[in-house]
Amino acid sequence: MNISNSSFRANSPTVDQVGVVERAKRFQTRSIKKAAKMAGLKMVLNMIDLTTLEGMDTEGKVKQLCYKARHLHDAVPDLPTVAAVCVYPPFVGLAKSEVADSGIKVASVATAFPSGNSSLEIKLDDVKMAVDQGADEIDMVISRGRFHKGDYGFVHDEIASVKEACGAARLKVILETGELGTLDKVRLASDIAILAGADFIKTSTGKIKPAATLPVTLVMLEAIRDHYFNTGVMVGMKPAGGISKAKLALHYLIMVKETLGEQWLTNQWFRFGASSLANDVLMQIVKQQTGAYQSADYFSLD
Amino acid sequence: MNESTATWELEPAPESTAHVQLEKSYGNFINGKFVESAGGSKFSSTNPANDKVIAEITESTEADVDKAVKAARAAYDKTWSKMEAKKRGKYIYRIARLLQERAREFSVIETMDGGKPIRESRDVDIPLAAGHFFYYAGWADKLSYAFPNRNPKSLGVAGQVIPWNFPLLMAAWKIAPALATGNTVVLKPAETTSLTALKLAEVIQQAELPPGVVNIVTGHGEVGAAIVNHKNIDKVAFTGSTNVGKIIQKAISGTKKRCTLELGGKAANIIFEDATIDQAVEGIINGIYFNQGHVCCAGSRLFVQESVHDEVIRKLKHRMKSLIVGDPLDKNTDIGAINSKEQLKTINKYIEIGKQEGADFYQPECSVPSKGNWCPPTLFTNVAQSNRIAQEEIFGPVLAVQTFRTVSEVIKKANNTPYGLSAGVWTDKGSKIFNMTSQMRAGVIWANTYNKFDPASPFGGYKESGFGREGGLHGLAAYLDV
C-alpha cells in the first residue's frame, strides 16, 4: 500500500459538527414501546461485550465475569447471552475454557492497550499471545500520536499488520475518539481503519473521557455506510464506554437501523462495549414483564 | 450465538388526547367574550388524518367583522394605546407563560386539527409561538431604544389574516408584535385550522387582557376580505398565497392602510461538491419534508453540483426510506397528513405534471392509513428550470432536483423565479457562503442548515414573496409609525 498522507485526508469527507449533533438528537425522539422495546432490550443484551480491563484483574474476577456472561439473570428464562467477554491477553485461555461451548466469543485487547505506545514488534507479539490462546476477536488501539502528527500511512500500515497477525480472529480497531479532537478526525481515522482491513471500528478504550457518544458513533456509522455503498463490504461498529442506560442503548439501535439498515442489527455487526449496561437492561426487561422496577440489589454485580 | 435476523419495527406510540378539552361548537371571540354570530352559519373542522369532525366553527358575517373591528377600535382608543408600555408587556408575558404551561394541550390540538406530526407541533410550533410572545413582550417598553430619536407611535387596529400551515405560530407572529407596539387586533385564522387560535382566545381571557384588544373571527376567504376592506382597519397583515396577496394589495390601494404580505416561495437549496454531504442530505430532508412541505420557505428546488449528484441522490433516497409517514399523533411520525383534500388534489396534480414532463419520479415504499389525506415523500430528478414543477409552488412534500456546474450558473438559476423568500447554501467553504448570499435575492438564506427560526430573526420576502418583515426588531417597524 503506497498512499501519501495527504491523499488520505483528501479522500475523507468533512463533517459538520452542528448538523451531526442535531441528527443524533433526533434519534432520541424515537419512542420505543411494548414488543419493540422488549425485542430491542434483548437485542442489546445479545450485543454486549462484557468487559473487565483493569490492572487488578485476576483469574477469579475473569471467572466471575464469564459466569455472568452465560447466566445474565437466571430469574428470567429465555434470555440471550452477551456477545463476548473482553479481557486482557493473559486471561484469554481461561476465558475461553470458562465460556466453552456457550457460543460466547472471547475478545482481547492487544497492541499495548490502552495507549498503543510501543513498537510494532511488541504489539504484534501482544496480538499473537491472545490469538495463540484462542481469542476470537482482537481489540487494537491506533497510534493516536502518529495520527495527530499526520502519519496516516503509518497508522494505516500498522492496522494492516495487526490484521494480518489476527489470522481468523476478527479485528476491532479502537480510534479513541476522545483523543482525536474533532469529528473530521473521527471520520478520517474511521476511513483509514476501514481501508486497512478493520472488521469493526470502535470508539474508545473506556479509559478516556468522553468515550462513546451518539454524534461520534453517527460519524463512524456514516463512514461504514459509505464504504458499504462503494464496495458492498460490511464493517461492524462498536461504541464503547459511557453507555450504561438501556434507553440510550435502544437509541443507538435506532441510529444503526436508520443509518445502516436492519442487516446491521445483529451482534455480528454491532456491539456495545460496556460493563454496567447489562444490569440496567435486565432491570428494564423485568420491569416490562412485571410492571414494577426491582431494586438494583436483585441484579448480580460481576 | 443467537443472532436476530427478524425485522425490528416500532410499535405505535400515540400521544394521548384524553387531556384535551374542546367545545362541540365555537363562536367568535369579540370584546373579550365568545359570542355566537348573528346570522352566520357553521362549518366543520375535521381531522385530516381520519376525516373525523373535531368541532363546528362559525362562518362569520360582515356584521360580525364590524363588531370585532368596533371592539378593537374602542379598546385601542380607551385602554391599550394609553396604557403604560410596561403594563402592556406584562400582559404579553402572561400569554407567553400560559402558552408554555398549556404547551402539551396546544400541541395535541394543533396536530389533530392540522395533520402535522406531534414531534413538530411539540418541538417547533408551540415553543416558537410562546417564544414570539416572550420576545415581543420584552420590547413593549423599549420601543424608543429600538428606534432612537424617532418617537415611534402605534397605528391603531390591525386586521390579520393567517394561513393553515403553522396556525398558532402564525397567530403569534401577528399578534405579539402588534400588541407590544400598542395596536389592537382582529385576526382571522384559516378555515381548516381555527382551533388553536380559538384556544389562544381562552389564554387571552386567562391572561385578563382588556376586552377588545384581541378579537378572533373565523370563516373562509370572504371573512378575510371583510376584514381587509373594513374602513376602520389601519393595518393589514397577511400570510398566504401570492394570488390572494395581489388581491389584497389591489383592494387597499388608495387607502391609508399599511400593509405587510408574506406570500409564496420556491426556494433554491444549493448543494456544492465541497459540502458535508451527509449533513446536507439531512438539510434537504428538513428543507422539503418538514410539515409535509406545507412551508412557504420550503427548499423545494434542489440544486446539486453535478460531480456529487449521484452520491447525494443515493443518500437522499436511503434517508427517505427511514421517514415514517402516518398518524400525526404518533410520536415517531416524521410526515403527517396533508392539511386538506383540496391541497392533496393540488399536490397530486403537480406530481402528475412532473411525470408528464418526463422527470424521474421516486417515492419510498410506505403504507399509509386508509382514511385521511396522505402523500409520501416525493422526489423528482432530471428536472429542468423550464419544468412547471421547478417553477410553481406545490406546497407539498415534492422535491424537484436540478444539477449545475458553476457558481455563476447556480446563482442565475436560483434567482430565476418570481419568488424570493428563502434559500439554502451548503458548502464547507465560508467565503463561498458569503459570495452566494450576497448575490441571491431571497429574504432568508440559510447556510449549512435549513428551516431555522428564531423570534429575534426577521423573516420576509423579495419580489412576489411579499414585503415587510416579521420577527426581530424589523417586525416592530411593521406595526409602528416611525
Image (cartoon, helix red, strand yellow):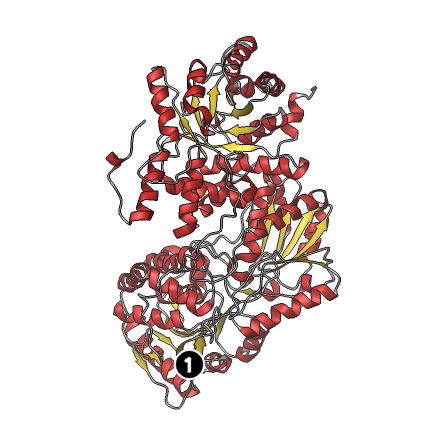
Q: Can residue B246 be seen?
A: yes
Tell me if mark 1 has few (under 14), some (14-19) or many (20+) residues whose alpha carbon lies within 10 angstroms of its own: some
Q: Residue B52: x percent and y percent?
A: 44, 75
Q: Residue B452: x percent and y percent?
A: 49, 52
Residue B387 left/right relative to A25: right
Quarter in which the C terminus of chain A is drawn:
top left
Residue that extends furthest to the bottom in the rendered view of this protein: B39
Q: Is residue A146 above or below residue A281?
A: above
Residue B395 left/right relative to B184: right
Q: Quadrant of residue B105?
A: bottom left
Q: Is residue B188 above or below residue B109?
A: below
Quarter in which the N terminus of chain A is drawn:
top right
Q: Residue B240: x percent and y percent?
A: 53, 70
Residue B272 left/right relative to B236: right
Q: Is residue B323 above or below residue B159?
A: above
Q: What element carries label 1?
A: loop
Residue type highlighted by circle 1: Asn
Q: Which residue appears at 40% of the width and 80% of the height? A: B56
Q: Can residue A31 be seen?
A: no
Q: Which residue appears at 49% of the width and 45% of the height? A: A23
Q: Which of B185 and A129 is in front in this view?
A: A129
Q: Residue under label 1, please give it.
A: B232
Q: Quadrant of residue B39?
A: bottom left
Q: Nearer the viewer, residue A35 or A96?
A: A96
Q: Residue B84: x percent and y percent?
A: 27, 65
Q: In which quarter of the image is residue B172?
A: bottom left
What chain does badge 1 belong to?
A: B
Q: Which residue appears at 59% of the width and 62% of the height? A: B265
In this rendering, the count of numbered labels is 1
